[in-house]
Image (cartoon, grey):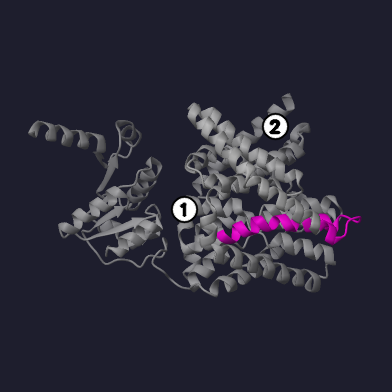
Amino acid sequence: MENLLLAIFLTITIATVLNIILKKFDISHIIGYILSGTIISYIFGFNGLNIYSLELIGEFGIVFLMFNIGLELSFSKIKKMKEILLTNGLLQVLLNVVVIFLLSFYLFKLDFNTSLIISLAFSLSSTAIVLTYLKKSKDILTPYGQKSMGILIFQDLAVIPILLLITFLTNDTLSISEVLIRTVISAILVLVFMFTIGEKIVNALLQFSAKAELEELFLGSVFSIVIGASLLTHEMGFTYSLGAFMAGMIIADTKYNVKVESDIATYKDLLLSVFFFGVGTKIDMIYFLENMFIVIFIFLLAMLFKSIVIYAIIRRNSDKNTSAKTALALAQIGEFSFAIFAIAGSHKLISEEMTNFLILVGVMSMILTPFILSHIYKISSYFEKEFYESDVITPIKLKNHIVIAGFGTLGRRVATDLKARGVDFVIISDNLKHVLLARKVGYSAYFGHLNKLPVLESLAVDEAKAIIITVSDEHQKRLISEAILNFFKDTNIIIKIDNSEEKQNLKDLQELEFVDASYEISNVLVNHALNK
């Protein structure tokens, strides 16, 4: 017990310190968790900690990620995404499997089973990294974000037949027809149960727990639904993730979907961090140092060919820029690939040395991915430029203009007032829907993040009369304000605050001019009352 507590303490401490350091360099926290796993594994050896238990906990990080995806995919949304989800997703998986198999089998002279396993695993991308970034950056609303999400969802569903195929390769007693028949029957039973009896159970459970008005009871109901559905599909021979995905789809059509998604967000992130920590424990640093150049060469080669295939698929009906961004976002090797390597290695379909090598290749691609995603607009701009590119906005030629950060209800009201007074202004928002709306009514609006230096330069913030920050999130207000002040200290920043606590939290930024929403509204209310 003491050894376990020591391992947990050291893990949390190392992960926290590493992520604080990496955050200063704008490096993804995922890398911090992977490195923490490697450090703990090598220096402390876990002191008897059961790695299988750790992997099981980490796997449920993926389960809750798939549940989250299901929450955003009602049947009506799937119908709308039919082209992206089915056509692009199917082509991406099939073509990448073919290309990577041919490279493995003919160029590198690997045996059939090894080539097949590598091609299947390498065809998958990282839902955990890419989808998390897309949501955080709001790029999920862009064309490339939608296409990336559709392909990722198809890949996650494709994991099921891929794992079944590997199971078949390890089974000498059942024929492929028997495996297929059993799979089809099991799939029908699961689907019928989940979307008939299961749907009624889910609705009743959520309704009952919501009426009780106890947050822990509602959260317990959600966990029961997710884990119960996961266990059901696993018992039927499928992955835990499939059950979670279907449970999410069922809840997506209820009135509780938004509350459920917000309630589990923290737990999902915590479990995902355990998953990436588990990935880090699999890194063999000695093997990596001995084979560093070949590992780097293979992972770059795999990402290159994978991105070429994805670019070609998306380019059929999209512009060069969207195709390039989608290809760059999905070029890495995903977390489900580690499950494929683990199963194949444990059943001796591939050697232990090959398993270590493939894990290193996958981890290297994961480490590189956050850097690619952070600079995806700059890289893709070499192919073609578009207006919703946060890092390559064409510099505007204005002076004494107003920059409006955010285009929600308040931002729209500010823009209307400025237009009525004949004042020049530009709008910057990280919500593409808001940008499209602003452009539709004739405003100069750009999709981007005002805390980025290229955006500050392009919008001529140093020449602006004022910056009006209308966003609601306190963290975003601070990020934007600090970035502007670092860029040009004499900028006139006007910021809307909602309460005195928020003003207190931002008081260290003395150059800001605060407009207290509650104070202004109270003045208006009193004036109206006294004028009657």
Q: Report which residue position mark 2 lands on.
A: 7
Q: Is residue 94 above or below residue 338?
A: below
Residue nearest the observer in this picture, 33 or 146:
146
Q: Residue at x 32, y 52 (%)?
A: 405
Count of numbered labels shown in the rendering: 2
Quadrant assignment for the N terminus: top right
Q: Amino acid at mark 1?
A: Ser
| Residue 261 drawn at (x, y percent) | 51, 42
Q: Which residue extends farthest top? A: 2
What's the CA distance linking mark 2 and mark 1?
A: 34 Å
Q: Residue at x 77, y 32 (%)?
A: 47
Closer mark to the observer between disc 2 and disc 1: 1
Q: Secondary structure at mark 2?
A: helix
- The answer to which quarter of the image holds residue 61 is top right
Residue nearest the observer in this picture, 187 or 389:
187
| Residue 491 drawn at (x, y percent) | 26, 50
Q: Residue at x 68, y 70 (%)?
A: 95
| Residue 511 drawn at (x, y percent) | 27, 42
Badge 1 crowding class, 10 Å Cα cut-off, few under 14, some 14 to 19, many 20 or more, is: some
Label whose residue precedes the other's in the sequence (2 or 1) = 2
> Going by the image, does 366 lie left or right of 443?
right
| Residue 242 drawn at (x, y percent) | 67, 49
What secondary structure characterizes most of the magenta part? helix
In the picture, the disc for residue 137 is: 1
- The answer to which quarter of the image holds residue 90 is bottom right
Q: Is residue 412 magenta?
A: no
> Going by the image, does 287 lie left or right of 65?
right
In the picture, the disc for residue 56 is: none
Q: Amino acid at mark 2?
A: Ala
**Magenta-drawn segment:** 150-179
Residue nearest the observer in this picture, 31 or 386:
386
Q: Residue at x 74, y 37 (%)?
A: 53
